[in-house]
Image (cartoon, rainbow, N blue to C red):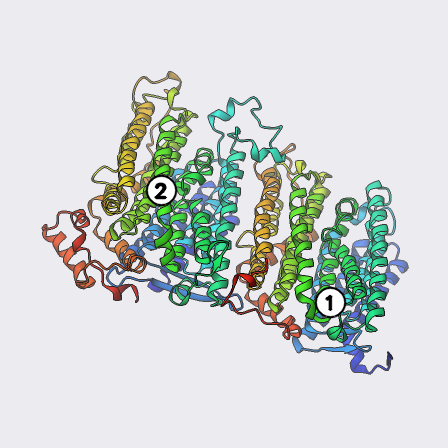
Amino acid sequence: MSEYALLYILFAPFVGALALIFVSNRQAMLVRSIAAGSAFVSLMVSLYLFYAYDPVKGGFQFVQKYEWSRQLGISLHLGVDGIGTPLVLASSILLFAGIFVSWHIKDRTKEFYIWLLILAAATIGVFMSLDLFFLYFFYEMSVIPMYLLLGMWGSHTKKYLEMTDPEGLKLRDSVGFIFNFGSNSKEYAAMKLVLFLSAFAVVALMGILLIYKYTGLNTFDILQLREHGKLLNIPVLGTTLDKIIWILIFFGFASIAPLWPLHSWSPVGHAAAPAATSMLHAGVLMKLGHFSIIRVAYEIMPDTTRELMPMAAVLCMFSIIYGGFVAYYAKDTKYVIGYSSSSHMGYVFLGMAALDYISLSGAVIYMFAHAMATGMLFAMAGWVYDQTHTRDIPSLGGLSNRMPFIAGCFVIGCMASIGMPGTVNFIAEVMIIVGSWNKYPLQVIVAVVGIVITLAYLFRMMRGLFYGPMDQKYSHSHDAVAVVDRLPLLIMITVSIGFGLFPMHLYNVVRSGVDPLVAKITHVVPVASGGRETLGVKREALENGTLSSPLSLAGDVSRITYHPSRGEQ
Amino acid sequence: MTFSLTMSTADLLLLLPEIILTCWICLVLIVDFSFPRLPKEQLAYLSIAGLAATLGSLAWFDYSGITGTLFADMFVVDRMALFFKMFIVAATILVILASIDFVHRFTFFRGEYYFLVTMSALGMMFMASANDLLSVFVTLEFSTFGFYVLVSYLREDMASNEAGLKFFILGVFAAGLLAYGISLVYGETGKLVFSDMKAVQATPGLIIGFLLIFGALGFKIGAVPFHSWIPDTYHGSPTPVTAFLSIAPKGAAFAILLRMFFVALATFKPTWVLLLVAASVLSMTYGNIVAIAQRNIKRLLAYSGIAQIGNVLIGLAAGTKMGNDAILFYLLTYLFANLGAFAIVIAVSEAIGSEEIDDYSGLGRRSPFLAFSMLIFLLSLAGVPPLAGFIGKLYIFVAAIKEGLYTLITVGLINIVISMYYYLIVVKKMYISEPHDPSPLTVSGPMKAVVYAGLAGTLIIGIYPQPVIDWVVAATMAFSNLAAPTAALPVTPTSIPF
């Protein structure tokens, strides 16, 4: 059973989606149960995977390889390392939570769950692909469900209603439609999202095809390319080929991340999407970008990564500050959370750019932590929208009397998003800041300012929604009382706080994936005193109380060790 | 040049599929005349039975490896010819199934419709085997002849008549080009069989001759700049004929193009690559950009077809065995997606009497089955995983990148994004817009069969293409003498041509 764990995680949602095709839309309860059941299978196996992953052994585990096309050199090669494992877990948690968040969808329930399951399964597929073809395959496959989810179950944003052409009839189908930047309709958001992501996906595909050609191995297999692929520094167009490929790969995938100049599809998409889709979109879809950059650029082109990654360190400052300020001035709850996500993704880029053991681990943990925090916030923004039918912050207020549970959870969600001690976000943020300080002090200062801005806009939104005087027209709104409504929030809060208090396994797992990668890129091996023992020492120290938290270790760089043999296994 | 027309039984065996189909066509015609009261759909099933028998015999040939040549190499039966014949026959079967609902719109000659469709298929089967310029000319005209009639079959409909006239005049013009080109080539070389031309010298007459032949074949496949007949003809023709026209002649013409470029002109590859790159870039870009502005689904599919042919030409420009495999694979994925999409167009047009994209509003509520199938077919045409079209595009790109056709791949990738836009406009209408009239639509049995066949092909090839890839690789073994893909390293800047 255990060696097939990845197949269960990947295919359970697909099987669920397939089963749903044969169920009538009238049997709403059966539809929901099938969706929840298949997501539950995924979740349970992901939990098993997370705890069964052996961080001491490291490397890719649970590997499955099936030849798919001999002539093209493609195989369905699945496997997770310390970076993929937490992200697979985050995806299946958010899928399971998302199914309960959208429990009350009445319109075409069956289709909704089918597309949601396909979306989640595709993202999970990316996180476990060890084949460039399948990485792209699942990546591109996750885009189209977004279009349908946004278009069919999404909502128009407020500004849209104030337009002179409210239905957008004049421009909706013409060529001009796509350039109709004033439009805030869900159709516009969906189309923009798909075209933007597809456009950059083909940029990445060009990079992948160039890797395929110039390594000359006739394979898309990442492990083989990593071991044997040598991209020579062929001079092309005034620079070298490996740099061109790296830039294609980086910007192709950074668009979904979303890095600053390429971010504009993302908040629009968040605002238009239904709650569960926003959760998956912000929680895991955006991480596909970071993950793919790590998997493709870091693994296959380590030397080029070392040369060019400072570019990301520059851009991430703009991401953090720009996203933060727009979030502060946004009036729409989902815009606030959407821009906050795009701002927070800047931290991940900072952690990745520093190419340091601590900061890269911090970046990976941040992806996991952010998935939980932003998932909570979007779920609750969705709840408030369902109850009040508005997302306009100034017109809302005082909802804490009507929905105390949601208000309480919202406070926790904001705290997690800010990075309060006790949540896993805190650990991740501190690791990024500590790890990047030596290399990028300016960026770290910007990141700390970004935390302050985050505090400002989240508190502002919290006050705007839940405190102050309440408009009487919202007096009929309800709290989340039923188990199905509370369950998703409770799951995400538990995970966020649980890993915040007991992060050691998460940390070990992530480190086991990050260590060989950073060693390969930087060729810096801090202290080689035997990695296996050190992990054990750390664990013992933590249990004995001599080491209060992993962060005390994180600050003490000299004690971070790397055992070269581990990565090569 | 002497023809020995002494034929043995073994030689006749090579013609068996064609002989079966010829006899069956006569049978269909006789039954139509003899039993005028017979419901016409019985004739459809009768034709399908004959086509199925033909398909069976072709599959048997392919399985047992029966190959050979006839009539002094004019007629060749190799595995590629068998592939294209099966391709054509399968397309014909699906088109006839899709026609059953449509035929009641014809005022006259409903029985002859099936005869003409099958006869065109027979002509295209000969095209797939044509191995010299004379048989190219004869078989190409033979297959086009049926189409001239079929395109204008809706006699009361001005658009159909216009389509027929346009197709006829331009088609005859193309035939003239072809005949002139053949005469120039024969005058320069004294040779007609492709495989004899390997050692010819490039003279101006020969170059012009081959350009003219390429023009005539470009007309068949609808590549820019020979595409001008496509939109109006596709728009005006009866929809099943449009579906047939959009796939089968393209397959047959590609069989000839492959033989011409890969056998006769193999030594001139550096020259014709430029020609094909130009045609491919123009077709993709023009087809996709003009498709954005279309309001009619048939015109949209017409322009998208022009763009798809641009994609196939990338594989031809690669000029390798792998490019050749990719062409066959791509055409097969195109067969399922395109015929499926046209089947939906027929079904919707039967139910609501309109082919405007705007009338597809709310199809997702009115008929979830049709809308979902259309979604799959359009996304396959756009090249979205896990559908067949994606694998087809990737196969073509991989073949091209090995030859270093960077411009072509860049243009092709950009065009994927452009095409995504107009396909998604249709998806938006179907799923996001509210229906003008919420009554549910009904779909007839034969139409469902076509749609299911399209869905099965699109999904199965998309999810597990290995058997099909094996098949196309085996089918093009005859071309294995071509240059192997160039070694990846070392590469200097000068060796990156595009």
Number of callouts in the render?
A: 2
Q: Is residue B112 left or right of residue A538?
A: right
- Front residue (pair B148, B180): B180
Label 1, secondary structure: give it: helix
Query: What amino acid type should be assigned to the residue bearing mark 2?
Result: Val
- Front residue (pair A556, A83): A556
- The alpha-carbon separation of the residues under discs 1 and 2 comes to 55 Å
Q: Is residue B198 left or right of residue A102?
A: right
* Mark 1 burial class by Cα count in 10 Å: few <14, some 14-19, many 20+: many
Residue A251: x, y in percent?
44, 47
Q: Is residue A480 left or right of residue B340?
A: left
- Residue at the image point whose x is 20% and y is 39% from the top: A421
Are tags 1 and 2 found on a single chain?
no
Q: Quadrant of residue A175?
A: top right
B317 shown above or below A183: below
Q: Which mark is residue A11?
A: none
Q: Chain of mark 2?
A: A
Residue A376: x, y in percent?
33, 37
- Mark 1 or 2: in front is 2
Label 2, secondary structure: give it: helix
Query: What amino acid type should be assigned to the residue bearing mark 1?
Result: Met
- Front residue (pair B289, B110): B289
- Front residue (pair B143, A466): B143
Contact, CB < 8 Å: mark 1 with mark 2?
Answer: no
Residue where numbered disc 2 is placed: A314
Residue where numbered disc 1 is placed: B260
- Residue at the image point whose x is 49% and y is 47% from the top: A200
Q: State the quadrant of the C terminus of chain A.
A: bottom left
Residue B226: x, y in percent?
76, 52
- Residue A554: in sight, yes or no? yes
B249 shown above or below A311: below
Residue B227: x, y in percent?
75, 50
